[in-house]
């Protein structure tokens, strides 16, 4: 995509205006309440998971639940990068976001989002080792290695976010400043650039789309091996428990990756569906994660019961 604007005559953009989601004006109060409650529930649900993993000795000593705690932490911050700004769109507040604020939002969204992408792959690898290599699992995946892998995911995510932010904002922005989206994301911001964006779109396709698709394929490959191993389990209860544990993760992965691939493998397009799809993986998915893991994971539910029972016992003892 090429831009033919005369950059020498236009003033550099110092702020952007987020147009937000298209909606009827009479629905603003309702939408404000809906997104406000989604944000509150997202924070509380993920905080509950984080505290449960941290407080329960049976959970925080196991790599699977260390990864789950990190996922909850990421969901809390990813939601905080996007949703509060989205909520303001349904009020009389200004929709202006400073240039630096737009840079920061784009960086942190891609930093946290790509870290989450790598984390899902680690979670699939962890489940693969636990089910397909059960005798060697304590050696192949221990607390120290898990910490190193998580740190690597954070570093890789930070590098990815930096590359995307630098490439996007190295371009001149000298004309229209209205971002036709509800947050500063690459496809929407690039449409305002006063220069050729072909390289940016190619990097977006490769660095985001192909990487996300590759991670997704690795996850599916891991689960193909997992399903093959589960079918060899002789007891129905053993198969049920294995499918229940893996089903939670596979559900979360699907609702996260499919929308991302839909958006970023079509970086040059402008579809009315993009906004709705983006709401799903930026707003709804962080809300669903704690629900999926608490409702489908028996060990997390048992830990929550122990935590609740312990608090009730402490209250009764104090009385």
Image (cartoon, rainbow, N blue to C red):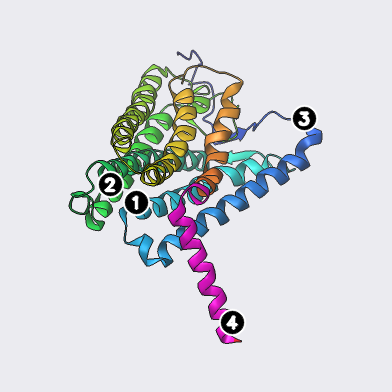
Taking the image as drawn, is residue 187 in sight? yes
Residue marked by disc 3: 24
Residue marked by disc 1: 64
Taking the image as drawn, is residue 93 in sight? no
Q: Is residue 37 left or right of residue 195?
A: right
Q: Name the residue: 40% across, 51% down.
A: 68
Are the residues at dot 2 and dot 3 in contact (C-beta closer than 8 Å)?
no
How far is disc 2 from disc 1 in space, using C-alphas? 9 Å
Comparing 138 with 152, the one in front is: 138
Are the residues at dot 2 and dot 1 in contact (C-beta closer than 8 Å)?
yes
Q: Crowding near pointer 1: few (<14 within 10 Å), some, many (20+)?
A: many
Q: Name the residue: 76% across, 38% down.
A: 28
Residue marked by disc 2: 130
Residue that lies at the very extreme toward the bottom in this rendered image: 319
Q: Where's residue 267, x and y in %?
A: 46, 21
How far is disc 3 from disc 1 in space, using C-alphas? 44 Å
Looking at the rendering, the stretch of residues picked out in magenta corresponds to 293-318
Q: Quadrant of the C terminus?
A: bottom right
Are the residues at dot 3 and dot 1 in contact (C-beta closer than 8 Å)?
no
- Looking at marks 4 and 3 on the same chain, the residue that comes earlier in the sequence is marked by 3
- Looking at marks 2 and 4 on the same chain, the residue that comes earlier in the sequence is marked by 2
- Looking at marks 2 and 1 on the same chain, the residue that comes earlier in the sequence is marked by 1
Q: Nearer the viewer, mark 3 or mark 1?
A: 1
Secondary structure found at label 3: loop
Q: Where's residue 34, x and y in %?
A: 70, 43
């Amino acid at each position: 995509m090429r831009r033919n604007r005369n950059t020498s005559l236009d003033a550099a953009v110092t702020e952007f205006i987020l147009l937000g989601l298209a909606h009827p004006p009479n629905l603003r109060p309702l939408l404000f309440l809906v997104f406000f409650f989604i944000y509150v529930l997202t924070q509380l649900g993920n905080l509950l998971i984080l505290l449960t993993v941290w407080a329960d000795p049976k959970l925080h000593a196991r790599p699977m639940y260390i990864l789950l705690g990190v996922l909850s932490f990421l969901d809390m911050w990813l939601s905080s990068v996007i949703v509060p700004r989205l909520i303001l769109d349904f009020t009389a507040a200004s929709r202006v976001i400073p240039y630096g604020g737009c840079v920061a939002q784009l960086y942190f969204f891609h930093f946290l989002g790509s870290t989450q992408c790598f984390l899902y792959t680690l979670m699939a690898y962890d489940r693969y080792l636990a089910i397909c290599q059960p005798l060697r699992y304590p050696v192949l995946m221990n607390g120290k290695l898990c910490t190193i892998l998580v740190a690597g995911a954070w570093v890789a995510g930070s590098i990815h976010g930096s590359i995307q932010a630098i490439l996007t904002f190295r371009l001149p922005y000298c004309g229209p400043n209205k971002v036709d989206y509800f947050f500063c994301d690459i496809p929407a911001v690039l449409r305002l650039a006063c220069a050729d964006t072909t390289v940016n779109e190619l990097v977006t396709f490769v660095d985001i789309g192909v990487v996300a698709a590759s991670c997704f394929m690795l996850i599916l490959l891991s689960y193909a091996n997992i399903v093959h191993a589960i079918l060899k389990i002789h007891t129905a209860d053993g198969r049920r428990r294995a499918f229940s544990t893996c089903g939670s993760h596979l559900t979360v992965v699907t609702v996260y990756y499919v929308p991302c691939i839909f958006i970023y493998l079509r970086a040059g397009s402008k579809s009315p569906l993009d906004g709705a799809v983006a709401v799903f993986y930026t707003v709804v998915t962080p809300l669903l994660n704690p629900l999926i893991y608490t409702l489908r994971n028996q060990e997390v539910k048992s830990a929550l019961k122990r935590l609740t029972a312990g608090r009730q016992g402490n209250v009764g003892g104090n009385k």
